[in-house]
Image: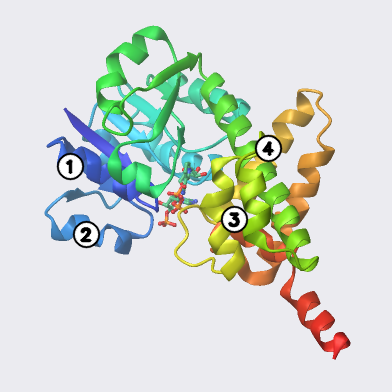
Amino acid sequence: MKVAFLGTGLMGLPMAQRLLDANIEIIAYNRTPEKLAPFRTAGVEIAEHPHKAIAACDCVILMLTNAAAIRSVLLSESSRQQLAGRTIIQMGTITPTESKAIAEEVIAAGGDYLEAPVLGSIPEAEAGKLIVMVGGTPEQFERWSELLQHFGAEPLLIGSVGAAAAVKLALNQLIASLSTAFALSLGFVQRQGIDVESFMQILRNSALYAPTFDKKLQRMRDRNYSNPNFPTKHLLKDTELFITEAQSAGLNISSIEGVRNILEVAVQRGLAEADYSSLFSSVNPEVLENYQINSAE
Ligand SMILES: NC(=O)c1ccc[n+]([C@@H]2O[C@H](COP(=O)([O-])OP(=O)(O)OC[C@H]3O[C@@H](n4cnc5c(N)ncnc54)[C@H](OP(=O)(O)O)[C@@H]3O)[C@@H](O)[C@H]2O)c1
């Protein structure tokens, strides 16, 4: 089998590497060709245009930012002409509505489409330990499970196209909301002059604890948001996707709208490319700390 891998960003690069490590032949495409340098050096086939990669394979994996990126790579006139008889596996985070619309267009062009968004980040992608959620038919799931197992040992069939995209957004809503809630309590404790470790000990032993708190604690305490696995701009994107979909489902979205505002402020502070724990700087701005220190003097 030969696989076209379109989108070798933070997640796509280690995922494509997993296929190479398993001796699966790939042809890779990325809008910014410089990011393909490690593959070029390793002799991996590189496509200059997405339609050339699609034409060369039966299966196309997409790991792109959003629906606009997917449309420009997959549904341009030249790419559309190559879709007949090919299976598209879309693995980025988009809304169920977007995923269903893209599926319809792929099918209209004679192709097959399933979604397989993932939970986990770069370390899990490198280790093949992502949680892969599949939206498609049982037949598609059976056919493509073996390939998807290179990314995560036990892909899960959630339902038809749209179902896995929905679960992925529900999970990312929790990432955004839990991290913001934790940042607020951490900032509060710090400003009250309470020992953070005492607070954490109580939290860790309580039903309120989530492992993600300890994952982000040190970054927040040090205000160190460098070398991101998951940048703030992507969490903001996923939060906006969730809001759009939840609003049309008739849910009260006021809590997550507050979280969106926190993320927007972090982006305005120049932290779009930083780790999403940078939302702490929006919840607990250092400018105000300085102001308080100065006014106390
Ligand atoms: N990072 C994570 O921890 C994580 C975890 C789970 C899911 N996800 C989801 O997985 C997807 C990819 O995430 P990532 O972290 O790998 O993002 P990333 O590093 O920003 O990579 C995004 C990819 O999309 C391409 N792209 C963006 N806009 C494009 C356009 N208009 N035309 C063509 N290509 C375009 C980029 O090309 P260039 O290189 O040219 O910019 C790059 O290959 C996103 O949907 C994200 O939400 C991410």
Figure quadrant of the N terminus: top left
Vertical comparison of 80 with 8: above or below = above
The residue sitting at 62% across, 50% down in the picture is: 201
Residue bearing the label numbered 2:
38
Name which residue type carries label 2. Pro
The local crowd at label 2, few if under 14, some if 14 to 19, many if 20 or more residues have their Cα within 10 Å, is few
Residue 109 - label:
none
At mark 4, the secondary structure is loop
The residue sitting at 62% across, 58% down in the picture is: 197
Q: Identify the mark nearer the N-term, 2 or 3.
A: 2
- Image coords of residue 151 (percent x, y): 31, 34
The local crowd at label 1, few if under 14, some if 14 to 19, many if 20 or more residues have their Cα within 10 Å, is some
Figure quadrant of the C terminus: bottom right
Residue bearing the label numbered 3:
233
| Quadrant of the image occupied by residue 140 | top left
Q: Identify the mark nearer the N-term, 2 or 1.
A: 1
- Nearer the observer: mark 2 or 4; the answer is 4
Label 3 beta carbon within 8 A of ligand 1: yes
